[in-house]
Amino acid sequence: MVNATIKTIELADGRTVTIETGKLAKQADGSVVVQMGDTMLLATVVSAKEAREDIDFMPLSVDYREKFSSAGRFPGGFLKREARPSDNEILTARLVDRVLRPLFPENYHAETAVMISLISADKDNIPDALAGLAASAAIAVSDVPFECPVSEARVARVNGELIINPTYSQLEEADLDIVVGASHDNIMMVEGEMDEVSEEEMLEAIKFAHDEVKKQCIAQNELIAELGVVKREYSHETNDEELRERVNKDLYQPCYELVKKQIANKQERLDSFAALRDEFIEKYLEENADNEEIDLELNTNLIKRYFHDVEKEAMRRMILDEGIRLDGRSTTDIRPIWGETNYLPGTHGSSIFTRGETQSLSSVTLGTKKLLTMSLSRGKRNFYYITTSHHSVLAKLKHQEG
């Protein structure tokens, strides 16, 4: 019998969530099973020991999957296998990614995969509300470097009462449904929908969620201490502090002066910064053309990276110190906005939306009368599936039952 380590978290309404580690997926760098009622999620994290030389970002993949088998079913119809992730699964994975990604060290570039699988489902507890906790806990018990535990909590309001991690039936009656991702000290992400609630009510719901997230973060820290987790040492970047200092010294003021010119055209502005950087690189290469001790290709890439930091800091100081943005707008001005309808004569409807230099061209084409009749004849089933698809596994099951 395997001895697993278990932590229990009590929610505001008395229900409990458990985090179990040490029983499943032992070859992963970190793995946990998070359970609430009969709903269970298995989360694993695997991270490469070394990073590829051409990578200067965090190559993180987050995947969330729900299968019919978790509820004791299999897909109906001709195909008996499930294919690509549903929209709900993709959106849940993105919510988790959004909270996790900023907390990996900036200089950590090893390929990392976080896999979250629904392995058991019941008809009450919504699994995606536990996905953020499961992912963070898996990283927490691993040796993968991470700033601090995080979690996510869903809050719904039913008849004026805030409910943590509501059931499917409660969610159908709610006029507020949000998911809050946070660490113990900071709220990092809020997403959801509300039926015209006030700002005060919104803030109350966020605070309510954050109080629950704090409990989950504390439980993860206790788990880390109990297991004696030690994070791995790594070295994924080559740096030259002397070169960094020179780039900052020689290019910060020219960058700031360029920012002050308030070049409105984006491409012209980018070209101006690129010319400033390339001029410095050309000068540096000429100075060190005969120096065999210097890797000119490596240092050229370092100069580009350091210049990006200098450029960013010059822009930031201009906005904070003088209240002026790159294109001359103040911090309270928005870009010019205009729209136009019926731009495309061949479609049934079209529109253009433009804000600054960003444009969206949208069009709509309606089906024939025959297709509309077919859709209406099956409308009850189609409409039901559309309105409940965000309810995930339960929606799948009800749709299968017809």
Image: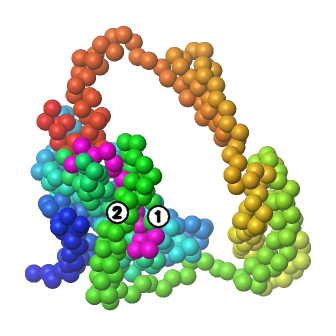
Question: What residue range appears in magenta?
Answer: 170-186
For image coordinates 77% across by 57% down, the residue present is 324
The picture places residue 60, in percent across and down from the top left corner, at 46, 64
> Label 1: how many residues lie within 10 Å, few (<14), some (14-19) or many (20+)?
some
Tell me if residue 288 is in the magenta stretch.
Answer: no
> Label 2: how many residues lie within 10 Å, few (<14), some (14-19) or many (20+)?
many
| Residue sticking out furthest to the top | 369
For image coordinates 26% across by 39% down, the residue present is 388
Tell me if residue 185 is in the magenta stretch.
Answer: yes
Residue 355, label in figure: none
How many numbered discs sit on the rendered protein? 2
Can residue 384 be seen in this snapshot?
A: yes
Nearest to the observer: residue 87 or residue 283: 87
Q: Which element type, helix, strand or loop, lies under badge 1?
A: strand
Relative height, residue 391 to residue 20 (above, below): above
Q: Is residue 309 left or right of residue 92?
A: right
Q: Is residue 58 left or right of residue 243?
A: left
Where, by quadrant of the figure, is residue 149 drawn? bottom left
Nearest to the observer: residue 117 or residue 174: 174
| Sequence-earlier tag: 1 or 2 | 1
Nearest to the observer: residue 201 or residue 308: 201
Q: Is residue 222 left or right of residue 169?
A: right
Kind of residue indicated by mark 1: Met
The alpha-carbon separation of the residues under discs 1 and 2 comes to: 12 Å
The picture places residue 6, in percent across and down from the top left corner, at 20, 78
Q: Which element type, helix, strand or loop, lies under badge 2?
A: helix
Q: Name the residue that disc number 1 marks.
A: 188
For image coordinates 34% across by 15% down, the residue present is 371
The picture places residue 361, in percent across and down from the top left corner, at 60, 30
Relative height, residue 385 to residue 4 (above, below): above
Kind of residue indicated by mark 2: Ala
Residue 209, label in figure: 2
